[in-house]
Image (spheres, rainbow, N blue to C red):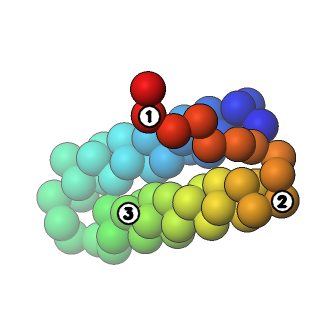
Amino acid sequence: MRIVVVLAFIGILASLASALVYLMKDQGKTNRTVNALTVRIGMSVVLFLFVLFAHHMGWIESTGLR
């Protein structure tokens, strides 16, 4: 389960980095920055829903604060 979450987090960071590269290269003339940020938001929402689903199914457990 940790591998899936870590890979998704790396994908989110890669999408954010690509948006920064597109912003610097294109200087706002194309929609590539917006598309990369849209992908990042979509991946973040999917990751959040997956964590909720995994908790509901019992694949992961919450430990609470110590």
Which secondary structure lies at badge 2? helix
Please name the residue shown 44% across and 65% down the image: 41
Please name the residue shown 65% across and 61% down the image: 52
Taking 15 as reference, is 6 above or below it? above
Q: Nearer the viewer, mark 1 or mark 2?
A: 1
- Judged from this view, the residue extending furthest toward the left is 27
Q: CA distance from mark 1 to mark 3?
A: 33 Å
Q: Nearer the viewer, residue 1 or 15?
A: 1
Q: Position of residue 13 (x, y in %)?
A: 44, 41
Q: Compare marks 2 and 3 and give the one earlier in the sequence.
A: 3
Quadrant (top left/top right/bottom left/bottom right) for the C terminus: top left
Q: Residues within 10 Å of mark 1 (few under 14, many from 20)?
A: few
Three-letter residue code for mark 3: Leu
Which residue is identified by label 2? 57
Can residue 7 be seen? Answer: no
- Judged from this view, the residue extending furthest toward the top is 66
Q: Nearer the viewer, mark 2 or mark 3?
A: 2
Q: Nearer the viewer, residue 24 or 52?
A: 52
Taking 52 as reference, is 7 above or below it? above
Q: CA distance from mark 2 to mark 3?
A: 30 Å
Which residue is identified by label 3? 37
Which secondary structure lies at badge 1? loop
Q: Nearer the viewer, residue 63 or 37?
A: 63
Residue 30 falls left or right of residue 4: left
Three-letter residue code for mark 1: Leu
Which residue is identified by label 1? 65
Q: Residues within 10 Å of mark 2 (few under 14, many from 20)?
A: few
Q: CA distance from mark 1 to mark 2?
A: 21 Å
Q: Residues within 10 Å of mark 3 (few under 14, many from 20)?
A: some
